[in-house]
Image: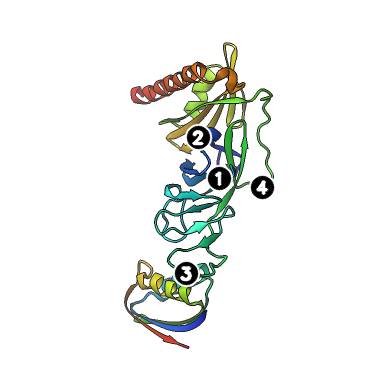
Amino acid sequence: MKLEAGWVPVALSASIEPGTSAGAVVEGSEIVVWRDNSGNAHVWEDRCPHRGMRLSFGFVRGDHIACLYHGWQYDIAGQCRYIPAHPSLEVPQTIKVPTYSAKERYGIIWATTAGEVSLPDIEVATGVTPVRSLYVERGADDVFAALTKAGTGDLIGNVGLLQAGDDRLLLAVQVVSPEKTAVHVLILGSPAVNAGAKQKHYAQWAEGLRFDLEQMAEVA
Amino acid sequence: MIERARFIFRGQMACESFTEFAQHRARRLDLDIEMEACDAMSATLAVKGQVDLVDAFEMACSLGPYDCIILDIERSDI
């Protein structure tokens, strides 16, 4: 799913700590996912308007992200507020990074450019436990097929639920490119119950899934 | 501080390409721009805006679009 088509999972919430940023790709669109020091997540185009440097290489200070290259600072609306080389400059409104709508739900950061679209409705009364984000060198169709084969039912758009013994996994799929797919893996249930051994177990399960998928590619 | 400046860019010019390039940079830098003349060897234009951004405009245009070669820039106050 493209960013303009609906909500796309772009990172596990737990992967983006306050004051950090990370790059991601959705169907070829390069994005920066960053979290300000107040804890709010933001998803923008991963490109400083000045010289095109990736903002995901930048650094977060309070509620601003600054480009690594020349230190241009942007507020949470993407508006450039400060240019170190011209400290007295009143930065024009035209120097702005394109931003995407971002939401956090089910332990995942979602992004979209679509207007009024709703997230999949999933019952997570007792919380979620993040496992890992897995990047697979295979297209989304193959990943969905493998997830279905593994027993994943209730596929809602790019989200699937997998019953694994007594546990339920939430699997959110992000199309990176025609040949690469990310799967964000979480356990439905409180970290108080699932953190530790279960996280490790399902991380290994996910890595096995990736191994099988990529082996399939090599055989083909 | 607001500055009004006239630039003459000299070199090998592709007018349509250079005009689009200069107007894009001016929009990004929140400058008023007026293209005054352009031929195969030079382009003359006037801009108005914050002095630091006029400087940035000069720097940006000194690189030119890929199909132009800027060899010399003449800048004067208006």
Residue A136 drawn above or below residue A101? above
For label 2, count other residues whose C-alpha is less than 10 Å away and answer few (under 14), some (14-19) or many (20+): some
Q: Which residue is labeled 4 in the image?
A: A115
Q: Amino acid at mark 4?
A: Gly
Give the chain letter at badge 1.
A
Q: Secondary structure at mark 4?
A: loop
Identity of the amino acid at label 3? Arg
Measure the alpha-carbon separation of dots 3 and 4. Answer: 29 Å
Residue farthest along the bottom direction in this orientation: B78
Q: Amino acid at mark 2?
A: Ser
Q: Which quarter of the figure has residue A127?
A: top right
SS at circle 2: helix
Pick the residue in front: A137 or B56. B56
**Mark 1 to mark 4: distance in Å?**
27 Å
Q: Are marks 2 and 3 on the same chain?
A: no
Task: Give the chain letter at badge 4.
Answer: A
Give the CA distance from mark 4 to mark 2: 26 Å
Mark 4 crowd level (few <14, some 14–19, many ≥20, 10 Å Cα) = few
